Image (cartoon, grey):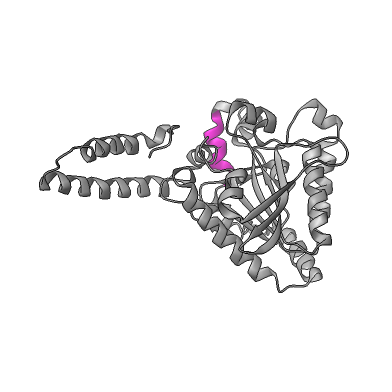
């Protein structure tokens, strides 16, 4: 079944799907009709594959924000065997933009931390569309420190356009709390796997993004700023977001080429919003294999390796021109 929310560039796919559904609904199909249906299915698959293999950066942003794209709460149901949610930061309140709790992945106990945007309007207002307040980052850090004390691996699912920019958030130390998370996550002596499942915007994403294995879903993005924010600074208007998306080089392919991430997780044909269960199985396999590869390392090895990997990001060479 096609998603209810349809992206504009997917229009040819939906038109062909509609034609295919009409043909398949025929009560007494002839051999010629059955042959037409088979050819149309092949054409639909080829069209979808070609379209999604050649998305431009701004189209990838639209896919990453798809309202029906699986979120942390969906992966809790589809990937993990058990989940016990933990609430609150012991200082201000419980930020619904970040979910934390004990979970089991193929029998392995882990601590899960993830952004949640919400589905309904009420949920989105409660979660602020995945934009966490300082209490959300304090909650995340306190649960990760708990995981470290009990020697549990940590899984972070990132999906946010950025930290919440409200006055209250600034008054309660938004930048400070994100900085504390960057510092303290870098010293935890347990494996940390971070996956960008949708949007990975600015410090809001990095606040739970310091890990030993960094992965990005195929049609997600990870950036120092949202394309609209970048367009507002460089071109003075968010209508140039497509230009900004092209310039930022934040797609999974770009990030892999730049050495910022370790892995790109393939999505189902037509994007993760088309098949939640298939996407969850791919994510589960990736999480299991990456944790298995890290579990033999000592705490100090993990910390040293984590330090080295982030120090290498952004390294460049300069050379004087002669002539």
Query: Which quadrant of the figure contains the C terminus?
Result: bottom right
Q: Residue 279 versus residue 188: which sits nearer the camera?
A: 279
Q: Residue 225 versus residue 7: which sits nearer the camera?
A: 7
Q: Residue at x 32, y 45 (%)?
A: 47
Percent x, y of residue 68? 51, 37
Percent x, y of residue 8? 41, 32
Question: Where on the picture, by quarter, is residue 184?
Answer: bottom right
Q: Can residue 249 be seen in this view?
A: no
Magenta stretch, overall SS: helix
Figure label count:
0
Position of residue 91 in the picture relative to residue 155 (left or right): right
Query: Which quadrant of the figure contains the N terminus?
Result: top left
Q: Which residue is drawn at 66% across and 58% down?
A: 104
Q: Can residue 205 be seen in this view?
A: yes
Whether residue 204 is in magenta: the answer is no
Percent x, y of residue 292? 64, 69
Q: Which residue is at the far right?
A: 91
Q: Residue at x 44, y 51 (%)?
A: 268
Q: Residue 203 versus residue 132: which sits nearer the camera?
A: 132
Percent x, y of residue 191? 72, 63
Whether residue 247 is in magenta: the answer is yes
Question: Where on the picture, by quarter, is residue 95?
Answer: top right
Q: Residue 213 versus residue 278: which sits nearer the camera?
A: 278
Residue 284 to residue 64: above or below: below
Q: Which residue is at the far bottom?
A: 296
Question: Where on the picture, by quarter, is residue 235?
Answer: top right
Q: Give the range drawn in magenta.
A: 240-250
């Amino acid at each position: 079944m096609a998603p209810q929310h349809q992206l504009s560039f997917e229009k040819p796919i939906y038109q062909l799907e509609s034609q295919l559904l009409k043909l398949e609904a025929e009560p007494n199909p002839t051999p010629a009709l059955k042959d037409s249906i088979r050819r149309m299915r092949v054409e639909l698959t080829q069209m979808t594959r070609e379209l999604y293999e050649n998305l431009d950066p701004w189209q990838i942003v639209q896919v990453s924000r798809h309202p029906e794209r699986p979120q942390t709460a969906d992966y809790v149901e589809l990937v993990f065997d058990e989940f016990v949610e933990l609430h609150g930061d012991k200082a201000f309140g419980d930020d619904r933009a970040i979910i934390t709790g004990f979970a089991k992945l193929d029998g392995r106990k882990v601590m899960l931390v993830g952004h949640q945007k919400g589905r309904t309007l009420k949920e989105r207002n409660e979660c602020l569309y995945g934009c966490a307040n300082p209490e959300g980052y304090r909650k995340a850090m306190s649960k990760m420190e708990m995981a470290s004390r009990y020697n549990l691996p940590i899984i972070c699912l990132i999906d946010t356009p950025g930290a919440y920019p409200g006055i209250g958030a600034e008054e309660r130390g938004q930048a400070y709390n994100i900085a504390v998370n960057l510092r303290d996550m870098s010293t935890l002596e347990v494996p940390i796997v971070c996956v960008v499942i949708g949007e990975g915007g600015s410090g809001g994403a990095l606040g739970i993004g310091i890990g030993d294995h960094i992965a990005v879903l195929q049609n997600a993005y990870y950036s120092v700023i949202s394309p609209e924010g970048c367009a507002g600074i460089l071109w003075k208007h968010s209508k140039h977001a497509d230009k900004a998306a092209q310039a930022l080089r934040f797609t999974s392919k770009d990030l892999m080429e730049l050495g910022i991430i370790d892995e790109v997780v393939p999505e189902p044909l037509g994007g993760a919003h088309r098949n939640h269960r298939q996407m969850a199985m791919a994510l589960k396999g990736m999480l299991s294999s990456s944790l298995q590869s890290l579990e033999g390392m000592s705490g100090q090895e993990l910390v040293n390796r984590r330090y080295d990997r982030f120090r290498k990001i952004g390294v460049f060479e300069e050379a004087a021109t002669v002539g």
